[in-house]
Image (tube, rainbow, N blue to C red):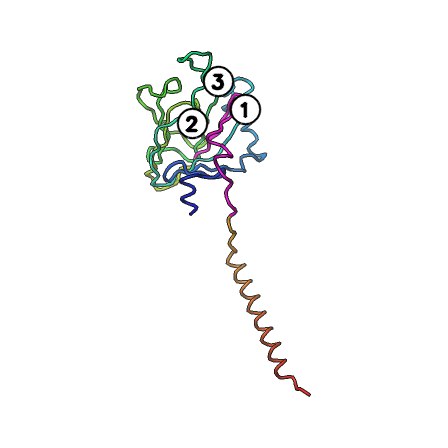
Amino acid sequence: DLQEKLQDLGFMEIKMRNTGRYDLQLPELRTESFSFLFETAPWMPLVRAALGAEAQLTHFGCMLSFPGSATQPWHSDGPHIRGCGEGDFVAPCHAINVFVPLVDMTLALGPTEFVPGTHFDFDLKAPSRTPTVKAGGALLFDYRLKHRGLGNSAGEERPLLYITYARPFFLDVYNFDRKRYAALPEVEVHASREERIAKRQKREAQLVQSQSTDQSSTDRPTD
């Protein structure tokens, strides 16, 4: 069923990242009202300082965590970019995530837990940090940083916008791969109560008219 497909595969428009945690693609974020995300968002000076003046917005969406959601496994959103022929070479930052919670974050809602320094070494042993950001605030971090969303033990949903910027050469072909994820099938649109009533009344009127026509044919005298 649809729930199993969400858990096992996912779709381009919605993916189940973990139990009770959904990654939603929002077309509204591409409208004129959100055009500031591309150039004039208040965090852009920091983004350009890290990625350069040609930093580009690559993708965005909403991570929605429902009450009872499970804690994610530790992960980074992308791997290191190797180069220079040296095994210990660590490239400069190539992508940055910006998290913008739409509600005041509390520990009960399940904020994101980070391990500082793991953008250089994923296996680094260091104390984790779990910032609780106010609604509308912004949290920026290196795409390679080790992190996880904590479980939501509160009685309300935890919506969080994510916006990713990257250097021009970078393309995430794992998290947002059209070969990996199919398009969401069309969902049947259910009629409203008023539409169902009008449809039933129309059928009843047609039935009455049909019965009246049949009765008239029966009552008509014959030669």
Residue 144 vs 26, above or below: the answer is: above
Residue 87 vs 76, above or below: the answer is: above
From the viewer's side, name the closer residue of 6 and 111: 6
Q: Mark 1 and mark 2 in contact (Cβ < 8 Å)? A: no
- Main SS category, magenta section: loop
Q: Which residues are magenta?
A: 160-186
Q: Earlier in the sequence, mark 2 or mark 1?
A: 1
Q: Amino acid at mark 1?
A: Gln
Q: Amino acid at mark 3?
A: Ala
Distance from label 2 to label 3 (Cα)? 17 Å
Q: Residue at x 54, y 38 (%)?
A: 27
* Residue 186 picture location, percent across and down: 52, 47
In this rendering, the label closer to the viewer, 2 or 3: 2
Residue 204 vs 148, above or below: the answer is: below
Rendered image: mark on residue 77: 2
Taking the view exactly as shown, the residue that stands out farthest to the right is 223
* Residue 194 picture location, percent across and down: 53, 59
Q: Amino acid at mark 2?
A: Asp
Identify the residue under disc 1: 56
Identify the residue under disc 3: 50
* Residue 154 picture location, percent across and down: 34, 39
